[in-house]
Image: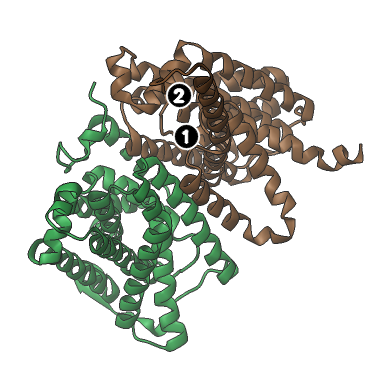
Amino acid sequence: MLAQQLLNGVVVGSVYGLFALGFTLLFGVNHIMNMAHGAVFMWGAFAGLFAVTMFDLPFAAALVIGAVAGGLLSVVLDWVAFRPLRKRNAPEFSAIVSSIGANLILLSLAQQMTATRVMRFPFDTFPIRFYEILGVRVQLLQLVIMAVVILTVVGLVWYLQRTNAGRQIRAVAYSEGTSRLLGINPFSINFQVFFLSGALAGVAGVLIGLVFNSVHFMMGEPLLLRAFVVIILGGLGSIPGALIAGLLIGIVQVLTVSYLSAGMADVVVFSLLFLVLLARPTGLFGSASGGAARVARQ
Amino acid sequence: MSFFAGYGPLAELALLNMVLAFSQYIVLRAGVFSLGSAAFAAVGAYAAAILATRYGVPPALCMVIALVAGGFFGAIVAVPLARLRGVFQALATLALVQIVLSLALNWTSLTDGALGINSIPKAVHITEAAIAVVVVAYFLHVIGMSGIGRGFDIIREDETVAVSLGYDVRKHHMIAFVLSGAIAGLGGAMHAFSSYSITPNEFGFHMVVMLLAMVVLGGRVSIFGPIVGALILTGLPELLRGFQDYRSIMQGALLMLSITFLPRGIVDTVLGRLRHRSLSRGASAKDRDGVTI
């Protein structure tokens, strides 16, 4: 029983990690708290769903379409909501307010379009098959999700660490002014970072839509709130932190639901956030320099 | 007279929203990025509603208790929250809203869960709401003119300068949280006594966004900022009743446009222009150069 629950927690948690990864990437590079990240996730899931229901595309294509849709939406978001503020050198407060506004717009557009319905992937989108591994029932879907998450993360890390573009992104994250002096085009960096962040959210959207088999306009909100906990726990801007904390939150949530009650899950998860902020505001894995600069030096 | 009869409930709602907007205003004025007003309002509303419906406490006393409860809750959470800044403060207060919301939903023996609390006596009408707005606004105005208000302004503009001038940032943040909690507690209680029933979901993310939008649109320095913001955002949906489906879209667009093009809000921008004009006129008359404020 416990092993089964742990497995479920790891699967859900890895998708949380994927979602939080895009969020933390944006914060690490651009210092933007994108409150509309949940809406991007939801639209990614919509795109994947429509690819399956309207065009009869297979699961893999739905993932790609979800990723591309999320990425493009995220880039548009940058142009509309963040770039005008960046030009004015506005404080981070402005970016949060602006993205809350964008979130509201994207949510109610989705609500109107779907007439507040809960949509589902068709029954045959993904073959339902079970395996017994060490006495634990594992669904094929769960294995595939783990594989997708691992592949995506490996791809992202490879892109950031091994390619020229990734080196530029890391340079901008380290110091935007200096990297501009070195001839790095901030326009292209912003495009890449927003696209990557949105694409991660889109993939996570399709996966979550499949796991819970429900796609609706509010699906991003609980995930965004979870992502806050994940990134604070993992340290703002830290990629391994986001993944480990995502797994942790997934496990904690599943265990709370199965051993306490479903309603308590939120209380436990958000109290965790509170405790971490109290004890170690830079997160369990965050570097002292990144986030700590924003925390009061008393 | 029929005009007032028709728009009475709307005016009452606008006044009640102003009280809640004051709670968001005072933290933003102090440079505290708190989104916790909805949580404080929930504490006040539930305290008042439970006392009134189960123990028969008179409404006026309930509201006083709600005010104290909100302030007390604000003081407790301020201890950890005043250590944080910016994004961290915003996230922590959002988590607070979520915790209070989950408790209100799941602590059914106390709160009746998702059903909410019903048949609360109607004790708040337009007069009571107006009195509350005037009293709170006057109180905040007095605080704003005092040393505390100056501290708030300096901390908001530049914390380093404030520290170098000897202002205790943490103390001011805590004061802001207590004030925000007390005002929201009162606002929540008045909301409960005005609308007959309360449910947990009223105090969720929607309220956070609404209050933030009011203060951002109106302005967060002058006391008239939240008043104007609450008036516009309560009245606008009514004026555009035909476009009811697009209400959230409009609210979101307003939020984005005002933070992009009017970052200081309507009232503060207008006041700033007027002040600038009178200053430059005075300067040219007396030919004082080099004096810029």
Depicted B64 relative to depicted A256: above or below: above
Which part of the image, by quadrant, shows the C terminus of chain B? top left
Q: Quadrant of residue A77?
A: bottom left
Instruction: Tell me if mark 2 has few (under 14), some (14-19) or many (20+) residues whose alpha carbon lies within 10 angstroms of its own.
Output: many
Contact check, label 1 and label 2, Cβ < 8 Å = yes
In the rendered image, the residue lying farthest to the left is A162
* Residue B157 screen position, x and y as percent: 38, 27
Chain bearing tag 1 is B
Q: Residue furthest bottom?
A: A56
Q: Is residue A271 visible?
A: no
Q: Nearer the viewer, residue B125 or B5?
A: B5
N-terminal label among 1 and 2: 1
Q: Which residue is mark 2?
A: B177
Of residues B216 and A162, the one drawn nearer to the viewer in this rendering? B216
Chain on which label 2 sits: B
- What colour denotes chain B? brown
| Amino acid type shown at disc 1 | Gly
- Colour convention of the picture: by chain
The quadrant of the image that shows the N terminus of chain B is top right
Percent x, y for residue A47? 42, 75
On the rendered structure, is A15 left or right of B258? Answer: left
Type of the residue with mark 2: Phe
Q: Position of residue A117 (x, y in %)?
A: 56, 69
Relative image position of residue A52 (x, y in whole percent)? 41, 83
- What residue did someone put label 1 on? B36
Q: Is residue B198 above or below residue B157?
A: below
Label 2 sits on a secondary structure element that is: helix
Q: Secondary structure at mark 1?
A: loop
Chain ID, green in image: A
Q: Nearer the viewer, residue A67 or A268?
A: A67
Residue lying at 43% horizontally and 88% vertically, measured from the top left: A55
